[in-house]
Amino acid sequence: MRSFVISMSLSLGVLVACGPSAARDDNASCPGVDTDSDVYNCGACGHVCSAGQLCVQGECSSDCDPGQTVECYEGAPQTEGVGPCRGGQRLCLPSGQWGPCLGQIVPAQEICGNGIDENCSGEADENLDRDGDGFTTCDGDCCDDGECSAPALVNPGAFDAAGNGLDDDCDGAIDNTQTVCDMDLPSRPATTVDYARAMDICNTTTESSRRWGVISASILKADGQPGAHADASSIRPNFGIGLPPQAGMSFTLLSSGHAAAPGQINPGHIDWEDSARNGVTSGFPADFIGAHGGTLPNAPGCPSPFGTQAQDPVMLSLRIRVPSNAKSFSFSSNFFSAEYPEYVCSPYNDFFVVLLDSTWNGTPANPTDKNLAFYRDQANMVYPVGINLAHGNTGLFTQCRNGTTGCLGEEGTISTCVSTAQLAGTGFDTPSSGYCDGDSLQGGGTGWLVTSGNVTPGEVITLRIAIWDTSDQNLDSVVILDNFQWSVEVSDPGTVIGGPPL
């Protein structure tokens, strides 16, 4: 039981108030604990008072009499008095509030070979993995036993999860979740890893290291072979005038044309309707199309694409070691196409896929075809992310003008367009009277979406993100990739609407 030694300046009345109370429960779930005065079990077993508070008659309180002192210790209770760990004193300030705990020594990361028991485990220089997370104290595990409240989640292979009060990754800082690493990146990066940085994946690692991060990054064709056109990918600080990054200072663009809005250079913009026609072809991703019997999937009620080749394809392939405490990831995307509205629900849809290679075999399961860029509606109908989200009013195609769609495909209507603000300055906002409506623009977009998938902690995954023209090289599309995040919770794999208000 934690005990608080109160200075002689305390009145007898306060001493009585802080003692055991017969009126409280018998503490059957934590026998021997005084829930009237124990800051770790104040009023109830497991109810911990905040730093700087005392437990008075079963209530956490920061009020005190100026000059009053109490003993204090903010490490795990079982480590006090072990090795160098010792308590300190807390002084009541003139404001009537408790000051910091001064003079205490709490558990720290073990430094092997110096004969000191820094983590206050009772043994100096032990090279053990008491928490079973695969990292020993000499591997740099800063919380292998009593140094923090969740030892199994804390080690050098973890990512720093937001708001849990832990130094998850043992870098010496608590809750430093995201480091901005995409400042001043050139549109044509010096290294392909910069495409990952523009998506806010800041860590890099190696095949042999157990620390998480990007192992390698490649720009490829849709079939995984080299040869994608250099103008099909870029890094940008903005796209048009109404679309800043979701996180950091930049994002990655992939396009079946040129990855640029009007006015941007390296590469420069080519009109989306005139089409870049980069002259590159490839096979489709073999595992993806194989899972669909050799035919590209399409939205319910829409015809299959023509041909057996991906036109103007580009793929960003990332090999990533997953943090030891991560069970899922997510990132933001925003898809635009000049095929809207005339070619909605036609064989000419540009394809966008997010293929995940992972050993995850839990629940919820990742898609059997590996593609996370899909939306499942309430009727359990599956829509690949693209302009066919505008077919059937899914609600995920929002940056556009409402009206008739599919005049050169399966004709329909859309009423889920809410704005064209994110089209401003992209070239997709250029007036272009088409077959469907007299006030049509050059294209439309989904608005910000969030794609997520599940992973096995510590594994190496491959994430393949690709876009290509189908059936011909006309009418280009582009997708923005940004705001990659890990999570300690499992996800519901797939794509949903997300991001700031439209």
Image: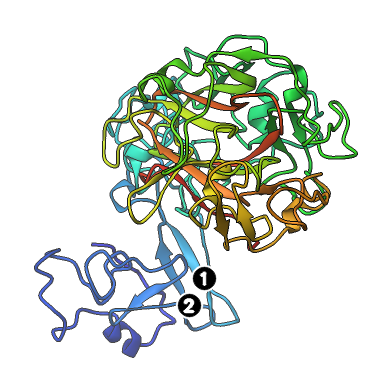
Residue type of the residue flagged with mark 1: Leu
Q: Which of 275/231 is in front?
A: 275
Instruction: Tell whether 25 sits left or right of 502.
Output: left
Residue type of the residue flagged with mark 2: Gln
Q: Which of marks 2 and 1 precedes in the sequence?
A: 2
Element type where label 1 sits in the image: strand
What residue do we see at 44% from left, 28% from top? 356
Distance CA(mark 1)–CA(mark 2)? 6 Å
Which quadrant of the figure contains the N terminus? bottom left
Image mark for residue 247: none
Mark 2 lies on residue = 68
Q: Residue 299: x, y in percent? A: 45, 41
What residue do we see at 40% from left, 83% from top? 10
Q: Residue 210: x, y in percent? A: 45, 21
Instruction: Tell whether 247 sits left or right of 170.
Output: right
Q: Residue 87: x, y in percent? A: 41, 55
- Whether residues under marks 1 and 2 lie with C-beta atoms below 8 angstroms apart, the answer is yes
What residue do we see at 57% from left, 76% from top? 93
